Every structure is written in structure tokens, then in C-alpha cells.
């Protein structure tokens, strides 16, 4: 598999995607887990729901509802959301956890749709197969440092999301790309094109 970035072992960086609307604030104040509009409007209840299935072997400080999410890498042909920026960030490895985002993603749509008329069947999914998926999500998760040894992030079907449990200061953030509907430009390309 071809990746967009060099491996973490070489870069010591992970990657965070943000809306262009949040970029000014981030470059001024850094990143906190709850400082984006989408935290409360799109994800908070979802994170709480997944946290409810956390197993006893996961440390208390690992709570999705208090995490900043990042990726270790992306496939070269990854499609990023329009009107977003790809950031490179430094992390404290001791305050990070790795889980399989593919499993969390299987739950998102049923979770969001369960209360809408005509989608009540989503509750049945969540109460049965969904519970099993979330148990697997937590059972297949591990500390960031354990992942550097086992490299689950390189296994087929394991889309590693990095859960970061500390503030990211602005000095530890670098803008790499600006993404539009039509293309992805490095910051240098963007500056050159629009100057």
C-alpha cells in the first residue's frame, strides 16, 4: 500500500483534518478536544455511546468524548473533505491511544438515524450487532506505544485512529494541504496559486 506521508517512525507526526472555518482559531490557540462546532453538533453523543462500551482493561483516561482524533497516515489516493486543511501535529505518545476507526464508522449512521421515523430498525442493530462491533472496537484498541511495536495500523482492514488526550499547542501544528472540491494543494502551492 502506498501512503501519502512517510511513516511515523521517521516523521514523528500524526495528521488531523479540520474545516477551513476552524483553521484561524487553531493556528492562534492550538487544538482542544471540544473547541470545534462539530464536537457538540455531530459527534458528542456518538462518542458518549462508544465510551459506554469501554472494557475494563482500557485506562480511565481513555475517553473518546475527550479525544482529539488524528491518523497515522493516509493512502496516497485518499479523498479529503472539501474545504478542509490537512495538519501535521506533534503528540505526546504517552497520552495517545489507537483504535480501529472502521469499527466506529459502522455504528455512526445507525446511531444518528435511530430516532428518525422509518429508521427505528437502527435501534435493533445497535442493541445487537452494534454492541458486538463496539466490544471489538475496544478489544482491538491499544496504547500508541504498543501500536508502534505491533503495528496494527499497517494491518489490512485496521484503519487506525489516534485518540489524543492532550492539548496540541499551536507551535506543534503545521498546515500541509488545503483541500477544495477540485484539488488538494500543498500550502506552498496554495500560496503560489493565490498570490
Image: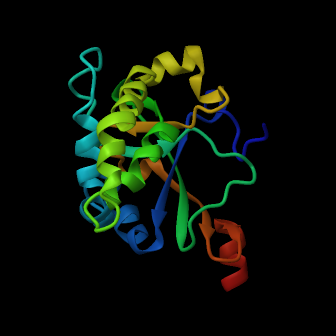
In-front residue for pair 129/90: 129
Tell me which residue sits at (61%, 69%) in the image: 179
Report if residue 16 is visible in the image: yes
Residue 32: percent from left, percent from top: 29, 52
- Does residue 6 appear to the left or right of 26 in the view shown? right
Total numbered labels? 0
In-front residue for pair 26/82: 82
Report if residue 66 is visible in the image: no
Tell me which residue sits at (46%, 46%) in the image: 105
Residue 75: percent from left, percent from top: 70, 46
The image quadrant that residue 126 belongs to is top left
Residue 121: percent from left, percent from top: 34, 53
Q: Is residue 186 above or below residue 149?
A: below
Residue found at the very far bottom of the displayed protein: 195
Please name the colour scheme applied to the rendered image.
rainbow
In-front residue for pair 185/140: 140
Residue found at the very far right of the displayed protein: 2
Tell me which residue sits at (29%, 14%) in the image: 57
- Does residue 129 appear to the left or right of 156 in the view shown? left
Q: Quadrant of the N terminus?
A: top right
Q: Is residue 101 above or below residue 24?
A: above
Residue 46: percent from left, percent from top: 29, 50
Q: Is residue 121 above or below residue 165?
A: below
Q: Quadrant of the C terminus?
A: bottom right
The image quadrant that residue 48 belongs to is top left
Tell me which residue sits at (36%, 26%) in the image: 135
Amino acid at each position: 500500500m502506498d501512503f501519502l506521508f512517510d511513516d511515523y517512525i521517521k516523521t514523528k507526526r500524526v495528521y488531523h483534518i479540520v474545516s477551513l472555518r476552524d483553521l484561524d482559531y487553531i493556528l492562534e490557540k492550538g487544538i482542544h478536544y471540544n473547541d470545534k462546532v462539530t464536537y457538540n453538533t455531530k459527534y458528542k453523543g456518538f462518542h458518549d455511546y462508544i465510551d459506554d462500551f469501554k472494557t475494563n482493561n482500557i485506562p480511565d483516561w481513555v475517553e473518546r468524548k475527550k479525544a482529539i482524533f488524528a491518523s497515522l497516515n493516509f493512502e496516497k489516493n485518499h479523498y479529503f473533505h472539501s474545504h478542509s486543511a490537512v495538519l501535521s501535529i506533534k503528540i505526546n505518545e504517552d497520552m495517545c491511544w489507537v483504535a480501529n476507526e472502521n469499527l466506529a464508522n459502522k455504528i455512526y449512521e445507525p446511531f444518528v438515524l435511530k430516532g428518525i421515523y422509518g429508521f427505528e430498525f437502527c435501534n435493533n442493530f445497535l442493541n445487537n450487532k452494534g454492541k458486538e462491533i463496539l466490544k471489538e472496537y475496544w478489544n482491538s484498541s491499544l496504547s500508541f506505544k504498543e501500536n508502534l511495536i505491533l503495528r496494527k495500523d499497517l494491518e489490512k482492514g485496521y484503519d487506525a485512529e489516534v485518540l489524543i488526550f492532550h492539548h496540541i499547542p499551536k507551535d506543534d501544528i503545521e498546515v500541509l494541504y488545503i483541500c477544495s472540491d477540485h484539488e488538494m494543494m500543498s500550502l506552498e502551492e496554495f500560496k503560489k496559486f493565490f498570490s
